């Protein structure tokens, strides 16, 4: 379970297809008939033939991922212990062999709750409490299970610097701490969320409470039948969903000249990565029918390298787990898999310390001061210190970055990304680290990942962003996750259209899907031409994005056959959203689709459902108010937005939407007040400053408009909207020199925009400055 408001914010902003499915709110297992029908036989059926693996698994964190709370499983201090945080004192105690916490309840009053399950075991343990409607809620007070030398044992708050109040989704009784949605599927086997949207209830089930054999190997009934019937060699993969056993063709051989190894066959590595990825990734769920061995993007959509989750160079920032990092690595590209480093049953490394890397990298070349420039056997001499630095999550849990990259202090100096050098040498500057590395190597080592500057340019709106991002999109040597991220930052224009069209045919499904998403702003006829072939893509994540892009094209513009294909894909998209009908993100996605298709009543119902699920969920208010605008129901929209502001008074998007509504009604003083609040609340978004400036100008307050726009432009010097507004408003106000300055800056930022050059020419017609001079 994630800890930190940044992680929960990602859930809101991504308009999630969703993060994870659910579990049972009762200690009783589901009926064995249900398990048998699904082909699940349980880990006890595996033990007779796989005793060594079963023994290793019994001591693993997978085995202890979730457990019934009892004297053997509870690691926290429930001997009348207490913890005070944010003015609330919580007490932990035992009674009649059961475990309890007395803490703030959903109504803000103290109440006593029984602990039903433990969640995880080290370095921390969380606890689950049963609530009505089949929900299990995760306490945000956790037990630090580390030894005293490391800071434990103790109770601590997962949000130490915040007062999370009842009603907030992050409160332990709130939606973002509901186990059925947020964390269940990755802590138990054969999880079925079973959410009833009409009743707003769960009947979540599992086959086994923990992460057992069939969580990774898939349902075992066919394999068990194969084994008991004499191991028929004609049965593929021994009757398993996917064969994960290492064989002779997966051995690695080190090349003595290079000091590196290559596998005989990378197929095994890819299989293990796909099996591990659903739980070891930040992703959305698009199908609840996943089985091990199935392609990842047929059931999940991995998060891209977006701000808040990853730095511009791909290093971890938010809690993203391992997959999104590992697929950026040269190791992944070379065919390394999870089980090459990790023993999959005990979860321990296959060797101690640097020896795990020496399986593939010659120790004589790499494990010495000539390579790492640090004293032998020191902590700095560990391969992971430089190539897999850690970041701490949930207060006490340091996790390694699995992108296995070369330290780049030169990029830290240039674009502000972290580096492993100053993570250890905290008293030193990035410039110092860069200079030391240059002394060692005579240059700035580059490594495999070369996309930091392109993604940084895209994030900051640099003038060279389009060219850098286009090159990255088509550079198939670079990781697909980075190229897909570049597509999300790329403005589709005549100059970038070629890269987007190429990406639509890419071998990497994540790239194809991102290319489709970038088509949003292009005219329908062109969108139909480009997206139609991908309606039949073999992977669900791509198909449903193609359908989403085409679902709003007017039916009259399409022939009957194509319309039927789009309708099929749109139905698959709707089904993907229904997987998480318990989340406001998914209901808002459905409302948006129905609104774009002209299905007003259905859209309104979905937006209303989203608000009912989470009263403070802003996108549902904004999108429903926009639907009311289309239906000429602005009075309803105003009441709705004011209700939203009452629920989320510091939300800039609601203030912006209200300001625009009031402006449409010619209530300019009220509109400007709302737009001013929006711009103040969201100074990091240039569009809010732009809208405020335009509104002030429209009301005749030109000087105030120019101040607002120039203030926003100082924060966002490459934003096209702001530069265009400053150029035209200054021009209309008779301030030709200022107008020309902003026009030139716009032309430099948007060299592919002929209207920008035309504006420069227009303003320069009678000026001494040459048309092609650079902006000051």
Image (cartoon, rainbow, N blue to C red):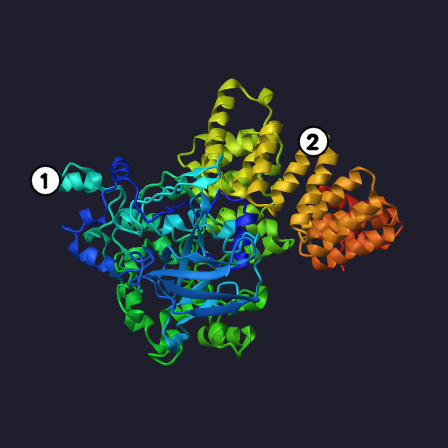
Q: What residue is at 60 percent from the left and 20 percent from the top?
A: 556
Residue 678, position as x, y percentages in the image: 72, 51
Q: Is residue 372 above or below residue 356?
A: below
The residue at which mark 1 appears reads as 230
Is 444 drawn above or below residue 536 in the view shown?
A: below
- For the view shown, which residue lies furthest in the left direction? 230
Q: Relative to 31, is 143 on the left or the right?
A: right
Q: Secondary structure at mark 1?
A: loop
Left/right placement of residue 656 relative to residue 229 reads right
Q: Is residue 102 visible?
A: yes
Residue extending farthest bottom:
375
- Which mark sits nearer the N-terminus, 2 or 1? 1
Q: Quadrant of residue 711?
A: bottom right
- Front-most of residues 160 and 773: 160
In the displayed image of the protein, which residue is found farthest to the right?
734
- Distance from label 2 to label 1 (Cα)? 67 Å
From the viewer's side, name the closer residue of 386 and 571.
571
Quadrant of the snapshot with the C terminus: bottom right
How would you rate the neighbour count of disc 2 (Cα within 10 Å): few for under 14, some for 14-19, many for 20 or more?
Answer: few
As drawn, the label of residue 630 is 2
Q: Which mark is residue 742?
A: none
Which of the pair 525/703 is nearer the observer? 703
């Amino acid at each position: 379970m994630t800890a930190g408001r940044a992680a929960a914010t990602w859930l809101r902003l991504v308009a999630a297809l969703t993060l994870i499915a659910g579990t049972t709110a009762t200690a009783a297992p589901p009926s064995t008939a249900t398990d048998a029908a699904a082909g699940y036989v349980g880990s006890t059926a595996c033990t007779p033939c796989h005793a060594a693996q079963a023994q290793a698994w019994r001591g693993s964190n997978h085995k202890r991922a979730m457990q019934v709370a009892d004297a053997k499983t509870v690691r926290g201090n429930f001997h009348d212990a207490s913890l005070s945080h944010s003015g609330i004192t919580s007490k932990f105690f035992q009674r009649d062999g059961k475990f309890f916490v007395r803490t703030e309840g959903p109504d803000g009053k103290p109440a006593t709750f029984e602990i039903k399950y433990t969640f995880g075991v080290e370095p921390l343990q969380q606890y689950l409490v049963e609530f009505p409607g089949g929900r299990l809620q995760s306490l945000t007070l956790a037990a630090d299970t580390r030894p005293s030398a490391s800071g434990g044992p103790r109770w601590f708050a997962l949000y130490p610097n915040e007062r999370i109040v009842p009603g907030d989704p992050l409160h332990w009784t709130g939606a973002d701490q509901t186990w059925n949605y947020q964390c269940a599927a990755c802590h138990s086997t054969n999880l079925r969320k079973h959410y009833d949207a009409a009743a707003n209830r769960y009947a979540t089930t599992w086959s086994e409470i923990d992460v057992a054999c069939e969580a990774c190997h898939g349902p075992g009934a066919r394999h068990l039948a194969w084994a008991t019937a004499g191991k028929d060699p004609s049965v593929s993969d021994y009757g398993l969903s996917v064969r994960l056993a290492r064989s002779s063709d997966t051995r690695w051989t080190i090349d003595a000249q290079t000091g590196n190894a290559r596998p005989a066959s990378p197929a095994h590595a890819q299989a293990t990565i796909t099996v591990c990825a659903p739980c070891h990734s930040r992703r959305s769920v698009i199908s609840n029918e996943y089985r091990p061995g199935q392609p990842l993007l047929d059931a999940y959509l991995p998060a891209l390298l977006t701000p808040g989750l990853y730095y511009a160079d791909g290093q971890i920032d938010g809690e993203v787990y391992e997959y999104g990092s590992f697929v950026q690595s040269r190791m992944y590209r070379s065919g390394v898999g999870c089980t090459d480093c990790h023993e999959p049953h005990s979860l321990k490394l296959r060797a101690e310390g640097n020896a795990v890397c020496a399986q593939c990298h010659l120790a004589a070349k790499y494990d010495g001061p000539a390579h790492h420039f640090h004293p032998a056997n020191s902590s700095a001499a560990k391969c992971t210190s430089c190539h897999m630095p850690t970041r701490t999550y949930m207060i006490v849990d340091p996790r390694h970055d699995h992108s296995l990259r070369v330290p780049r202090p030169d990029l830290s100096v240039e674009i502000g990304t972290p580096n492993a050098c100053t993570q250890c040498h905290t008293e030193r500057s990035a410039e110092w680290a860069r200079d030391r590395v240059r002394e060692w190597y005579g240059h700035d080592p580059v490594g495999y990942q070369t996309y930091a500057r392109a993604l940084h340019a895209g994030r900051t709106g640099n003038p060279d962003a389009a060219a850098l991002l286009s090159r990255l999109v088509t550079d198939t040597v670079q990781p697909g996750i980075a190229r897909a991220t570049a597509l999300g930052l790329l403005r589709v224009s005549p100059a970038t259209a070629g890269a987007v069209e190429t990406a639509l045919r890419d071998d990497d499904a994540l790239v194809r899907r991102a290319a489709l998403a970038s088509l949003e702003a292009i005219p329908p006829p062109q969108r139909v031409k480009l997206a139609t072939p991908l309606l039949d893509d073999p992977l669900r994540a791509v198909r449903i994005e193609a359908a989403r892009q085409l679902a709003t094209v007017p039916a009259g513009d399409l022939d009957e056959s194509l319309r039927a294909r789009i309708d099929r894909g749109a139905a698959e998209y709707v089904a993907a959203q229904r997987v998480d009908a318990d989340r406001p993100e998914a209901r808002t996605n459905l409302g948006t689709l129905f609104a774009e298709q002209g299905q007003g009543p259905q859209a309104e119902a979905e937006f209303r459902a989203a608000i009912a699920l989470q009263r403070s969920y802003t996108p549902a208010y904004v999108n429903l108010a926009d639907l009311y605008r289309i239906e000429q129901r602005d009075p309803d929209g105003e009441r709705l937005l004011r209700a939203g502001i009452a629920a989320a008074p510091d939300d800039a998007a609601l203030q912006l939407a209200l300001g625009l509504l009031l402006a449409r009604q010619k209530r300019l003083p009220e509109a400007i007040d709302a737009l001013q609040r929006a711009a103040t609340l969201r100074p990091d978004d240039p569009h809010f400053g732009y809208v405020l400036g335009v509104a002030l100008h429209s009301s005749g307050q030109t000087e105030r408009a120019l101040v607002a726009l120039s203030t926003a432009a100082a924060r966002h010097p490459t934003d096209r909207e702001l530069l265009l507004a400053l150029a035209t408003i200054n021009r209309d106000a008779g301030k030709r020199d200022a107008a020309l300055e902003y026009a030139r800056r716009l032309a430099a930022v948007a060299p592919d925009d002929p209207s920008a050059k035309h504006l420069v020419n227009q303003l320069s017609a009678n000026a001494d400055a040459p048309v092609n001079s650079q902006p000051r």
